[in-house]
Amino acid sequence: MERIAVSAVRKSFNLKPGQTVTVDGVTSSRIAVLDGVDLTIDSGEFITLVGPSGSGKSVLLDVIAGLTEATSGVARIDGVEVVKPHARTAYVFQQYALFPWRTALQNVEYALEVRGVPATERRERAKDFLHLFGLKGFEDRFPSQLSGGMQQRVAIARALSTDPQVLLMDEPFAALDAQTRDILQSELLRIWEQIKTTVVFVTHSIDEAIYLADRVVVMTARPASVKEIVKIDLPRPRDLEIRNSEAFNAYRGRVWESLRDEVGKAQRDWTLASTYAN
């Protein structure tokens, strides 16, 4: 069943005052980031988005989340146009976005609190999700008392505690060391196998994209559209050893081949990367 449908989505931003950009001979005070993105995602799919830096992957996520309005085109969840944050959508950011004055348990509880879940129920549910992510015994720790990996576990537990239909993840493991990143990828897959929520996951890592995904969506350089969608026919459940397989290496080569030219284009365009004026 189709859960997310993105149709002809375009998004542009104003440049900083006094700045212009010339594209194909046309000078403008706005810069296009998304250019006619079309994408459909089924219920329970795990989709990863890869593309050059600055190509608009996070902006596309924000459009789906209802955090930014498309310049044209439309995003729908379960057939309903997204015009504001959806009640059954959760978002995990690269930075952990935890409240420093709340304990791990209280941070997870917050997502349930704002939805009106009674105190006893939300406390038990928050505990269950912390334990699911291996944080039993850390319920009363504040974020400053947790490692980066633990903080991100809390952030993901908070997002999943609300039983979202759609989980949007914007490079959630990018700031972590390689070993912690591998562990959290496996933990995320383990839990996703149980709950089968629809996940859209932005990453710069080709290996991460392939390891996690049912389909890898390769985005073009800015202004971004969908260049190619690679279906990942690797068996599930997956463990890290699958990255050493011949099939995984073949997918790695295919995704990089699709992405390589776009990275080159983006490098020539990075001089504009600091010109957005939201």
Image (tube, rainbow, N blue to C red):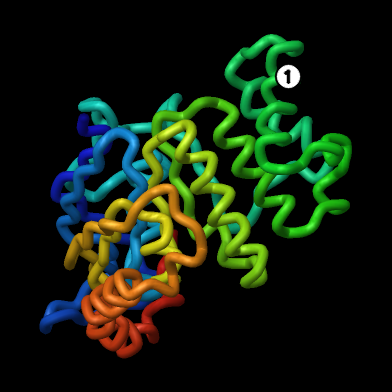
Q: Quadrant of residue 138?
A: top right
Which quarter of the image is occupied by the C terminus? bottom left
- Kindly identify the residue that appears in the image at 81 percent across and 48 percent down: 143
Instruction: Indicate whether 71 appears above or below 75.
Output: below
- Which residue corresponds to mark 1? 124
- Kindly identify the residue that appears in the image at 27 percent across and 75 percent down: 250
Label 1 CA crowd tier, 10 Å (few <14, some 14–19, many 20+): few
Is residue 157 visible in the rendered structure shown here?
A: yes
* Position of residue 52 measured from the top left corner of the image (x, y, whole percent): 35, 75
Is residue 16 visible in the rendered structure shown here?
A: no
* Position of residue 205 measured from the top left corner of the image (x, y, whole percent): 44, 71
Q: In terms of depth relative to the viewer, which is nearer, 195 or 167?
A: 195
Q: In terms of depth relative to the viewer, which is nearer, 145 or 131?
A: 131
Q: Amino acid at mark 1?
A: Glu
Q: In terms of depth relative to the viewer, which is nearer, 8 or 234?
A: 234
Instruction: Indicate whether 219 appears above or below 254.
Output: above
